[in-house]
Amino acid sequence: MNLDMIIMVLIFVGTIFTLIKFQQKSGLVFGVAFVVTYLTNNISDQQVIDSFSNQGLLILVLLMTCSVAIEKTSLIRWITGKIEGRSYFVTWLKLFLSTAIGSAFLNNTAVVSTMISPVRNNATIPASKLLLPLSYAAILGGTLTLVGTSTNLIVNSMLTEAGHEGFQFFSFTLVGLFALVITSVAIYFVSTKLPTIKANKQDFQCYLLNAKVQEHSNLIGKSITDAGLRHLDSLFLVEISRQNRVISPISPNEQLKANDRLVFSGDVRQVTQIKQFDGIEIVVDSNSVSVDNMTEVVVRPDSDLINKTLKKADFRSKFNAAVIAFKRDGEALSGKLGEIKIRAGDYLVLVTGHDFSKRQNVKKNFITLSGVEPNHKLTGKKQSFAVGGFLVAILLAAVGVVSLFKALVVLFGLLMFTGCLSFQDIKQRLPYNIWLIVGSAIALSHGLGNTGVLSFVTSLISLELTLDNAFIFLVGLYFITLILTELVTNNAAAALMFPLAYSIPLFYGIEPTPFILSVAFAASSSFISPYGYQTNLMVFNAGHYKLMDFVKAGIPVSITFSTSVLLAIYVFYPIVKS
């Protein structure tokens, strides 16, 4: 090995180990690897330009940006209204199918975030029995199409950059659908074994929330019962303050009057229910201000807040928001909120200021569960155009009338022109981190090829690949990627393993498509760890799960999914000479 090869091997191996240690900073890790590769002259200027302007990568960026317009419509929320059934099986089946189908064409993070609230508010079925299957359905649904998950698009972008014909829209569907059908049986079985986690007052430390009856409210003169204030979900009206007089306990027949101060106790996450009542304004006493926006968020793995306290992070001025509840792994934390160090996956309930949704750092630091996201709803003709335009663009690309890239470019322009997308939306939601990861990974693969590392690794394989034994190599490649995706996230695992999946089969004159598919599906099979995939992280906190709940449910699901994927690839994409 010459010096350049040694340097590239050190960069590649160092990237893997650094990703394992600093999983929350995957974009930074890949960025550093790219810079070192470039500074050591292992990639050319043109290869750098090609890496970050790759058509497949631009398709990924365009798709994720255009999908913001869909999130601003009521489409997903309309779907969530149809999921409740008369029995657990019917509800589970509706939830699973609607989530899987939606995730095949839409951003699965948006699908899951919209589904969480109605699932938690289900009066008959504990949320813990449905939320984990919800995430699993989103993962499986994402494997059905080229646009279903960023992993598929990342692999496709690296494939086209290598000079190979890219995947078609439904290239993943046969394998994905077969795996979905088989794995859904395992998911339903483990769903019935999930713990029943019921919320109670102790879970939320009985937070007190203040509201005021406005003078124009149509609830004035109505009794507490008639106003509907005695049947809120996990919120309890404990007292009324009226003209320096406190009324407690409260009779069901007590009539509301203008300027009454209502004190609620219970789950702060359900406070948005109060906003549904005409003329009742929520007030947070600790801030001494009235607020119009509250939201639930999960701290992202790559957030700048990690290992900082709320006080050190200057949370209030940075986000114009106050934290009134703080959860970790389903348990309330003790001590002062301002002194608790923030970790990835922490669940926060925020009281937000008027410009919270416009701040560019919000999307970077949080996954929003409910509240201020999306920023502005689309209604009327704009909503119809956003949904119709997106469906037409995907349909035209799927049947081959136009390329997916052209369809998305035109759609993006029309969404901007009609106001369905704004420059503010783009600033907040442009996937800079994924762009950096994929562009850097493509550049890294160029470096590995330029220095001869890939050829050297191929020569080290003691058993030459043939049509008879190549499937054994494919299986090994799959499980290495599977382990990596649980350690370093799905996108990073796909980007790291693609060069081996593409170059080694080609060296032996074998068509690389089955091997690339094995990497794509393995990178999407994060079922065991709550931190390997964003939707897992979202339901982990929302469902109050423990880490072992994921492990116990995820292992049989992962085994079933892996077996069905490998069998489907063997049947539908047989290994042949290139």
Image (spheres, rainbow, N blue to C red):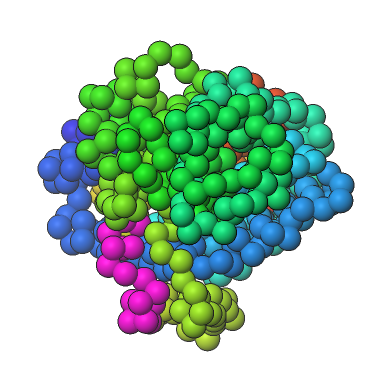
Residue range of the region highlighted in magenta in the rendering = 414-429
Q: Nearer the viewer, residue 571 or 129?
A: 129
Q: Seen in the image, is 380 located left or right of residue 322?
A: right
**Residue 255 in view (yes/no):** yes
- Quadrant location of residue 2? top left
Residue 239 image point, x, y percent: 57, 30
Magenta segment, prevailing SS (helix, strand or loop):
helix
Point 32% across, 47% down: residue: 353
| Relative to 282, residue 77 above or below | below
Q: Seen in the image, is 577 located left or right of residue 328?
A: right
- Quadrant location of residue 392? bottom right
Point 46% across, 54% down: residue: 215
- Looking at the rendered image, the quarter that the C terminus falls into is bottom right
| Relative to 21, residue 410 above or below | below
| Relative to 496, residue 413 above or below | below
Point 18% across, 39% down: residue: 36
Q: Nearer the viewer, residue 557 or 571?
A: 557
Residue 575 image point, x, y percent: 63, 55
| Relative to 530, residue 96 above or below | below
The outermost residue toward the top is 335
The outermost residue toward the bottom is 401
Queried whether the magenta region covers residue 337, the answer comes back as: no
Residue 113 image point, x, y percent: 54, 49
- Looking at the rendered image, the quarter that the N terminus falls into is top left
Q: Seen in the image, is 316 located left or right of residue 238?
A: left
Residue 438 image point, x, y percent: 35, 51
Q: Seen in the image, is 406 located left or right of residue 112?
A: left
**Residue 131 in view (yes/no):** no
Point 29% across, 53% down: residue: 355
